[in-house]
Image: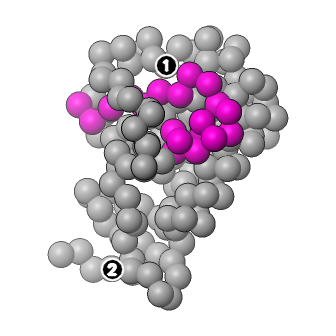
Amino acid sequence: MTPQRPGVCFRQTRLCRFVTTPDRTDAPDLTSLETARRISALCEEKLATDVAILDMRAVCDYTDYFVIATGANTRQTKAIHDEVLARLKADHRILPRSTGGLPEATWIVDDYLDVVLHVFTPETREHYRLEDLWNDVPKLEAAATG
């Protein structure tokens, strides 16, 4: 058993940060798949389009899932990012390890360690085509939210 420090847990050999409160245990309450599905549901609540979950476990060791979503413009991509960040923090005490792509907001990346969220504008998503780059990995059903 790995020793625990406040605000830090060791799960699946990856360090994950989360906000602690005195009345909760020091462990996130979602698995990596549940986190991916929760993130995809939050993206859809903010009207993201083409939300996809890619199962990355077989091809990379730094994350389990990619969640890919598209916002209509930079204002919406920022709103999607802000909503996911706020709701995961409030509901599950989970914060991203790092965030990239702000303030431009054409491609925002939130690294939650087990799940990496990519929020694109339509033009940027078409340019980088992550689904084509990772076409050999399983694409999961994003609608199976909890």
In the drawing, does residue 137 fall left or right of residue 1? right
In the drawing, does residue 115 fall left or right of residue 60? right
Identify the disc placed on residue 107.
none
Q: How crowded is mark 2: few (under 14 residues within 10 Å), some or many (20 or more)?
A: few
Q: Nearer the viewer, residue 84 or 14?
A: 84
Q: Nearer the viewer, residue 133 or 74?
A: 74
Inspect the magenta stretch and tell me whether residue 45 lies in it.
yes
Identify the disc placed on residue 4.
2
Residue 125 position, x and y percent, is 61, 18
Q: Which of 73 and 107 is in front in this view?
A: 73
Quadrant location of residue 45? top right
* Point 56% across, 22% down: residue: 50
* Point 70% across, 28% down: residue: 71
- Say what secondary structure mark 2 lies in: loop
Q: Is residue 69 above or below residue 31?
A: above
Three-letter amino acid code at the position of disc 1: Leu
In the drawing, does residue 71 fall left or right of residue 95? right
Q: How far apart are marks 2 and 1 (CA)?
A: 36 Å
The residue that label 1 is drawn on is: 130
Residue 58 position, x and y percent, is 23, 31
* Point 37% across, 71% down: residue: 27
Quadrant location of residue 69? top right
Q: Residue furthest bottom?
A: 22
Three-letter amino acid code at the position of disc 2: Gln
The N terminus is located in which quarter?
bottom left
Inspect the magenta stretch and tell me whether residue 17 lies in it.
no
Residue 88 visible to the viewer: yes
Residue 53 position, x and y percent, is 42, 31
Chain part drawn in magenta: 39-58
Q: In this view, does 28 lie above or below 111?
A: below
Q: How crowded is mark 1: few (under 14 residues within 10 Å), some or many (20 or more)?
A: some
